[in-house]
Amino acid sequence: MEKVILIKYGELTTKKGNRNFFIKNLYEMLKHKLKDYDVEIIKEMSRMEIIFTNDQLEEILPIIKHVFGIHKYHVAYKITTDLSVIKKQIINILDLVKFKTFKVEVKRSDKSFPMNSVELSKHLGGYILKNKPDIKVDVHNPDVIMHVEIKANNITYLYTNEYHGLGGYPVGSQPKALLMLSGGIDSPVSGYLAMKRGIKLEAVYFEALPHTSLQAREKVISLVKKLVTYTDKIILHIVPFTEIQEAIYKVAPHSYGITIMRRMMYRIMEQLANQRKAYAIVNGESIGQVASQTLTSMKVINEVTNLPIIRPVACLDKLEIIDIAKKIDTYDISILPYEDCCTIFVPKHPVINPNSEECLKIEQKYDFNNLIDDTLSKIKTITIKDQEEKQYEGLL
Amino acid sequence: MYLFFCYNNISVGGGKVIYLDYSATTPVNDEVLSSFIKVSKDYIGNANSLHKLGFESRNLMQSAEQQVLKLFKSLDKEVVFTSSASEANNLSIVGIAQKYPDRPKRIITTKLEHASVLNTVEYLKRMYDFEIEYVENDDNGQIDLIDLRRLLDKGALLVSITAVNSEVGIKQDLKSIKRILKDYPQTFLHVDGTQAVGKIPVDLTDIALFTCSAHKFFGLKGIGCLIKDKKVILEPLIHGGKSQSIYRSGTPAVSLIVSFAKALRLALENLDEKYQHVEKLSLLLKKELSTYPNIKINSNTFCIPHILNISIKGIKPETLIHSLEQYDCYVSTNTACSKDISSSKTLVAMHQPSQICTSSIRISLSYMTTENEIREFLKIFQKSYDALNFRNEEN
């Protein structure tokens, strides 16, 4: 019996007009993710089928688990539509499963098959009962569901398993956005959630060497490496932020330090977004979590840019964010104790309700525009790919 | 004179040899050695250091770790690098014995284990009152699964079983053993895979602790590893700062670790073809040696083809080894690691008569062995055999 993986789409099937576009995106992503494997991907309007060589299944399944736009997937046996073959194979399949109760679910798109779905489920259910001892039918809460899909071209799929995909839209079905990635818990989670909606991300890390360490940068790279498992590559921009921070520290009252710093970051983000043709800024701000994330702070900080700012975790509790961070395996990296540029100049009493005019007044005390241009010209960029960097290939 | 007849790849000090002792150790692969040298020269930082050189070393080391886990299809596990498989076995057994005081102080193992398992469990018995149970095995060396169940029913902390025995090459039915252990979730499984890795496929699922060593698969001597289930906790043997792993202190030997990863990758390439090659040569060797009336072939159908253990009635194995050595031809008595023991423990465990147990030699092959080497070996063997047998008859 030939084994295949059946991919069922999620939300994207509801997008009638754009359906082909989404399917194509999903197809390209799967093709990329599985390029090192000997697989064939067949795309159809309602689903995809992955044909693979047998020993690769264990490696392929976790990869599929990381692709957005998939609702469910199954490892199915693909056989010829023939009642006696179907009967024989469902017994073989059920021999591999431990269960006490079952039901048969038939989907028949090939209407030329002599029995309809209800008749066939009854027929197969009866056959299973006759051939396997000590089991019962339970249509409401069975231990195992024997799925039988009778398709065109004389092909039938049989399966009992069901894996949940990540849902969402395939990455690339939305244009690009820039993610502000600090190294904390919230921003990687925001990046994950943004990608889930199909956004293609580039990440931006503000670095304050030597106040922050290279380890902090490594930490951010490690986070990007986790995020990139959901896409093909993420470009990381490292912004040398030390001079701006030191200038702010000199001219701004300490209570306004963070507010001004965030405004400078957004200014840089906006210009970088223009350069990179990105349509939005994504960050990990969560309402009320710290002084710069109160609504009043957000408003004042937001004033410096016209780009949409997507805050996927804005309304989540810290514990909810942590749950997602653990699920996507970024939590353990995020809690490594290296200081980032936001925590290094933190004043004892940051302003909670900053004032726009006050900010503008402070910002006039220094030629920040020049400094921003200078900083933009010094951005370092690295590309992090999902498939292992070959930099050590010779050595390893 | 002999040099002209020998067509093989191994050279020692410029001269060519017939090396048939691959299960004792293998010559290092050139690519592996060049990685070792390159990393030793180019990555000078201590992988634990905070500065850039430290990162570079650590990043490389972590890539090597990931490669090893990936090659073992064990990305959900963790790897602890050690100096050898012996250390990895000690760490597994002694380490686990000290961390689970609430569980039974009983360890189940077999009589077919390597000394680094046997002597370690005996140490636990002597020093910490552990009860050591040895599973029965049949004359073929296959462990008795019913007896294993019986022992497990008494409660045990650990079952330690070698995937492939080092003296005779017996392969255990790990699939069935794992299936049985599923019924005993309180008992951990340790598998010594030293003689298996690079020779046969190994499946690490449901193995809490798996150990092996690079020099058995054309890596360097001085590096072994433990692939461990993340949930299992161990008391380290070597205490100190957190290093490559919290379970083993000491400055990470990055160049050795990288060489390990590379050796493993190369060893697992075309494993099937390499196996078939060795199998073919092993059959040839077996066929020829079984024509000798005084030779008993101890390796059976349960053994991997890489190891051929034979007993020669009336000839002392040491004498034969030294005779073969005159022709630059190298095989082993028992295993190289236990050269002082005159009777093969494995053969004793396989219920063989003492004459068989005290007269065994081990011929071990690898994918590098050629048919010419085997034919040449057989000629040399014939010469040595005739000479020694003649002496025996005279006496």
Image (cartoon, helix red, strand yellow):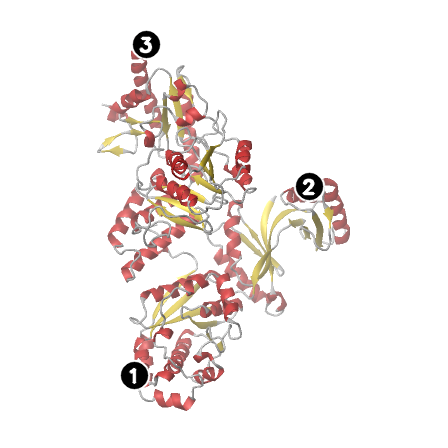
Give the image location of residue B141, x and y in percent: 47, 28
**On the image, which quarter does residue B327 sit in?**
top left
Q: Which chain does tag 3 point to?
A: B
As drawn, is A293 to the left or to the right of B146? Answer: left
Question: Distance of mark 3 from mark 2, alpha carbons?
Answer: 67 Å
Label 3: how many Cα within 10 Å (few below 14, some 14–19, many 20+): few
Quadrant including the N terminus of chain A: top right
Q: Position of residue A195 (x, y in %)?
A: 50, 67
Label 1 sits on a secondary structure element that is: helix
Question: Which is in the foreground here, disc 2 or disc 1?
Answer: 1
SS category of the residue bearing label 2: helix
Rate crowding at label 1 as few (under 14), some (14 to 19) or many (20 or more) other CA atoms within 10 Å.
few
Amino acid type, residue under disc 2 in the picture: Lys
Assess disc 2: are there few (<14), some (14-19) or many (≥20) residues with their C-alpha within 10 Å of its C-alpha: few
Quarter location, residue A129: top right
Q: Chain of mark 1?
A: A
Q: Residue beneath label 1, please?
A: A250
Q: Amino acid at mark 3?
A: Glu
Do circles 3 and 2 both sit on a common chain? no
Give how far apart the Cα atoms at labels 3 and 1 are: 100 Å
Q: Amino acid at mark 1?
A: Lys
Chain ID, mark 2: A
Q: Residue B34 or B194: which is nearer the viewer? A: B194
Q: Which residue is mark 2?
A: A88
Q: Is residue B287 toward the left or the right of residue A315 in the image?
A: left
For the residues beneath circles 3 and 1, the answer to whether they share a chain is: no
Residue found 33% across the figure and 75% down from its top = A241
Of labels 2 and 1, earlier in sequence is 2
Which mark is drawn over residue B393?
Answer: 3
Is residue A198 among the parts visible in the rendering? no
